[in-house]
Amino acid sequence: MKYALMDNEGQLLEKGKRPSADNLDDFVAALYEIGDQYKGKFTGIAVYTPGKIDTEKMIIHYGGALTFLDVLNLEETLGFRYGVAVSAENGGKGQPGAGQ
C-alpha cells in the first residue's frame, strides 16, 4: 500500500508505504492507521485500487488481485469516519471496467 498527503494544488507533502494486507480486516485497519495519522490535515480521500469501481456509490466490485475487497464501500468505510469526500479509480492496467 502506498499513500501520500497532498495539498490542494497537487503538491506532494508526505508519502509512505506499507505491506499490502491479505484480508479485509487488515486492509481496513491499515487504511484507518494511515487516515488517523493525518486526521485533520486532509479535506478529501482518493483511492486507487484494483477491481471495478462504482464511482457514484464508491463501491469496489471484484477487487482484482485483492478479491477480499469485493463490495467494499469506501464512502462508508472512509468518508463517514473522516467526514470528507471520497473518490476512487481503478488501479489495474487495461482491465475492463476501469474507472467505472
Image: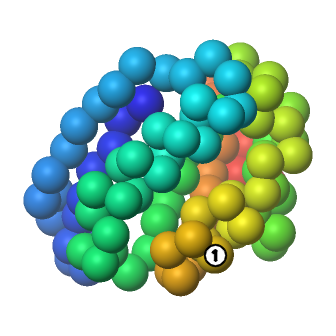
Residue at horizontal 59 percent and vertical 30 percent from the top: 26
Residue type marked 1: Phe
Q: Position of residue 69 (x, y in %)?
A: 76, 35
Query: In the shown orientation, is residue 37 left or right of residue 98?
Result: left
Residue identifier under label 1: 80
Is residue 97 in view from this perspective? no
Decide: few, some or many residues near mark 1? Use Cα within 10 Å; few <14, some 14-19, many ≥20. few
Residue at horizontal 62 percent and vertical 52 percent from the top: 89
Residue at horizontal 82 percent and vertical 69 percent from the top: 57
On-image quarter of the C terminus = bottom right
Residue at horizontal 49 percent and vertical 46 percent from the top: 31
Q: Position of residue 32 (x, y in %)?
A: 48, 51
Q: Position of residue 30 (x, y in %)?
A: 47, 38
Decide: is 78 above or below 100: below
Kindly state the secondary structure of the residue where label 1 is placed. helix
Q: Quadrant of residue 79?
A: bottom right
